[in-house]
Image (cartoon, coloured by chain):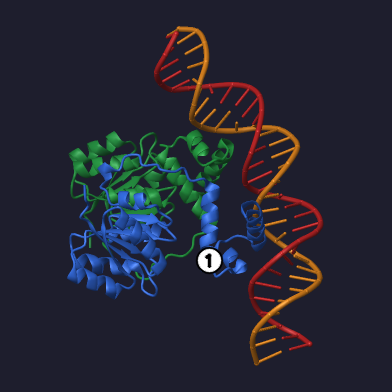
Chain colours: A green, B blue, C orange, D red
Amino acid sequence: MTNESHWLLIDDDDAFLQVLARSLARHGYRVSCATTPVEALSVLESTHIDRCVLDLNLAGESGLQLLPELLSAQRDLDVLVLTGYGSIATAVEAMRRGAVNYLCKPVSVSQLINGFEPLEATPELRPEPPSVEEMEWEHIQRVLNEHEGNVSATARALNMHRRTLQRKLQKHSRWRS
Amino acid sequence: MTNESHWLLIDDDDAFLQVLARSLARHGYRVSCATTPVEALSVLESTHIDRCVLDLNLAGESGLQLLPELLSAQRDLDVLVLTGYGSIATAVEAMRRGAVNYLCKPVSVSQLINGFEPLEATPELRPEPPSVEEMEWEHIQRVLNEHEGNVSATARALNMHRRTLQRKLQKHSRWRS
DNA sequence: TTCGGGATGCGGCATTCTGTCTCACGCGCG
DNA sequence: CGCGCGTGAGACAGAATGCCGCATCCCGAA
């Protein structure tokens, strides 16, 4: 039962990329890596890819922007969006742009592989009230996204001090990555 | 410039349904309502619907389950999922099941209408800058209501200490009322 | 080119808020 | 009655916040 799927991993964190690539290779997959949008697109031009793992937090450009470009480069591509700081806003946006799934780090390799499977029986996923912290984080993400990552503008819009927002972002990025 | 779109609103909260229906009617839309899955499906059988607003928190059954049934009843239906407690998991699941968008209550009517627009037509709609404090308060109110005013239960659901919730409620009731 | 405005990251410090523990009280129930 | 549960509130250490400053960058106007 060999697996012929060819994966493309896109993430600006090289260490993470290598670890993940090794794990997938051990599962019998062919794996390519890219750390930048241009690199990813050039891979797609020369190779046929089955499954693509896209990190949203690419240095500089957002992976959200890259997603449609990937799909137009190869229409039958399955793209799974992976992110360190997940939010509903980016999740919906990613799905609307054609991702097949959206997961938050840290994920296990099996979760990742499973994430590409079509709608399996995922029953009883009923919404439960999120904690205020999750709520706050979601909201911050949304507004931050609206302001294109501008921390100062986001802090003003959120009516909170820039220093406070800074510290919140710091803490979350530590815990999530 | 009349608008011929026919909407179907599905929510088990009748009051919410009526308010929303009235607002949409004022915008020139034709609006039907349903409070149960069977009711919704029967509407779809007799009428052609353009836009469907589906609440995830239907009494008993999850709206997530109803979503594919709606789409199989009418294939060209645009379904926007609306939920009180948003989460990444349900958002992704809803999108995978064919929703065109996923929004969290409370939403304005303009947000709702805009949520049906395709991505290209969604430039920068930023009607209000919601502050993080307002967000927190809204959320606390909603969960408090859900727990019928039980402070202890609400604190547990919100993953915060009862004492802290107590103090927040106190402060708000003083300054606001 | 220089200059000014704005964004960012970070240190420090006084003030505020939160987590935790504690007690007292009320209420329904077997 | 005792028991469980919810509520309100005092006290105090530790964490978070508001607010100052300073040092970079980057970028568009002069």
Which residue type carries mark 1?
Asn
Q: Is residue B124 positioned above or below C25 on the image?
A: above
Q: Quadrant of residue A73?
A: top left
Q: Residue at x 44, y 43 (%)?
A: B128
From this viewpoint, is residue A122 visible? Answer: no
Q: Quadrant of residue B21?
A: bottom left
Q: Secondary structure at mark 1?
A: helix
Q: Is residue B11 positioned above or below A57 on the image?
A: below
Q: Nearer the viewer, residue D18 or A31?
A: D18
From this viewpoint, is residue B81 visible? Answer: yes
Q: Nearer the viewer, residue A111 or B119?
A: B119
The 10 Å Cα crowd at callout 1, few under 14, some 14 to 19, many 20 or more, is few
Q: Residue at x 18, y 39 (%)?
A: A46
Residue A155 lies, in percent from the top left, at: 52, 38
Residue B36 lies, in percent from the top left, at: 33, 73
Q: Which residue is mark 1?
A: B145
Q: Residue at x 58, y 40 (%)?
A: A164
Residue A8 lies, in percent from the top left, at: 28, 46
Would residue A49 be found to the left or right of residue B104 on screen? Answer: left
Q: Is residue A54 positioned above or below B20 on the image?
A: above
Would residue C24 be found to the left or right of residue B23 on screen? Answer: right
What's the chain of the residue with tag 1?
B
Would residue A25 be found to the left or right of residue A14 on screen? Answer: left
Tag count in the figure? 1
